[in-house]
């Protein structure tokens, strides 16, 4: 069974199994995905706390670059049950800063599950080590700028192709 979700002039076909997997339901205006991508209430509360207690590297990247970036970034943004360090909704991009806990066995497995979850929604995850922020901030910022511009081009071209299908 195939359902179509419309957003403006764009139509996206979702199979029934994918719809149910993503926690969606049918409504009067088409498909509604549940709070999967928007963040659970528990994750939102935790994200609020994390915004107040950002790490030194997160404060540096946010204050030096992302806060003033022309395309809006959110800090400590809840996506499903996960919390992204930085999220750009327009470019469908997550930026993660990895400290030492991310290189332990459990941390790496959690990061992998989070990345797989976000890929289901078409979100690209960029990872930087905290050391990179401290030693090569300008290079990290240039790379983020490059990726954001590329993602915007990709998303615009894919949307225009869907219009003509």
Image (cartoon, rainbow, N blue to C red):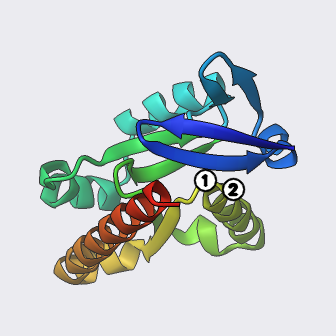
Residue 11: x %, y % from top left = 55, 45
The residue that appears at 65% across and 16% down in the rendered structure is 28
The residue that appears at 47% across and 46% down in the rendered structure is 10
Q: Which mark is residue 121?
A: 1
Dividing the picture into quadrants, the one containing residue 16 is top right
User: In this image, 146 relative to 18: left or right?
Assistant: left
Residue 36: x %, y % from top left = 67, 36
Q: Which mark is residue 117?
A: 2
The residue that appears at 31% across and 70% down in the rendered structure is 153
Check disc 1: other Cα within 10 Å, few if <14, some if 14-19, many if 20+: few
Q: CA distance from mark 1 to mark 2?
A: 7 Å
In front here: 147 or 84? 147
Quarter of the picture holding the N terminus: top right
Check disc 2: other Cα within 10 Å, few if <14, some if 14-19, many if 20+: some
Q: Are marks 1 and 2 in contact (CB under 8 Å)?
A: yes
Residue 8: x %, y % from top left = 41, 36
The secondary structure type at the circle numbered 1 is: loop
User: In this image, 154 relative to 69: left or right?
Assistant: right
Dividing the picture into quadrants, the one containing residue 112 is bottom right
In front here: 68 or 130? 68
The residue that appears at 77% across and 73% down in the rendered structure is 105
């Amino acid at each position: 069974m195939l359902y179509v979700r419309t957003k403006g002039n764009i139509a996206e076909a979702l199979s029934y199994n994918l719809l149910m997997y993503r926690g969606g339901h049918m409504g009067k205006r088409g498909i509604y995905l549940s709070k999967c991508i928007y963040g659970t209430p528990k994750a939102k509360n935790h994200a609020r706390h994390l915004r107040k207690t950002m790490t030194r590297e997160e404060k540096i990247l946010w204050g030096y670059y992302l806060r003033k970036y022309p395309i809006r970034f959110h800090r400590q943004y809840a996506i499903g049950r996960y919390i992204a360090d930085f999220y750009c909704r327009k470019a469908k991009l997550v930026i993660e800063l990895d400290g030492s806990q991310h290189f332990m066995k459990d941390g790496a497995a959690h990061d992998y599950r989070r990345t797989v979850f976000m890929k289901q929604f078409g979100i690209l995850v960029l990872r930087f080590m905290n050391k990179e922020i401290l030693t090569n901030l300008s290079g990290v910022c240039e790379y983020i700028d490059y990726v954001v511009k590329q993602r915007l081009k990709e998303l615009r071209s894919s949307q225009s192709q869907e219009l003509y299908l």
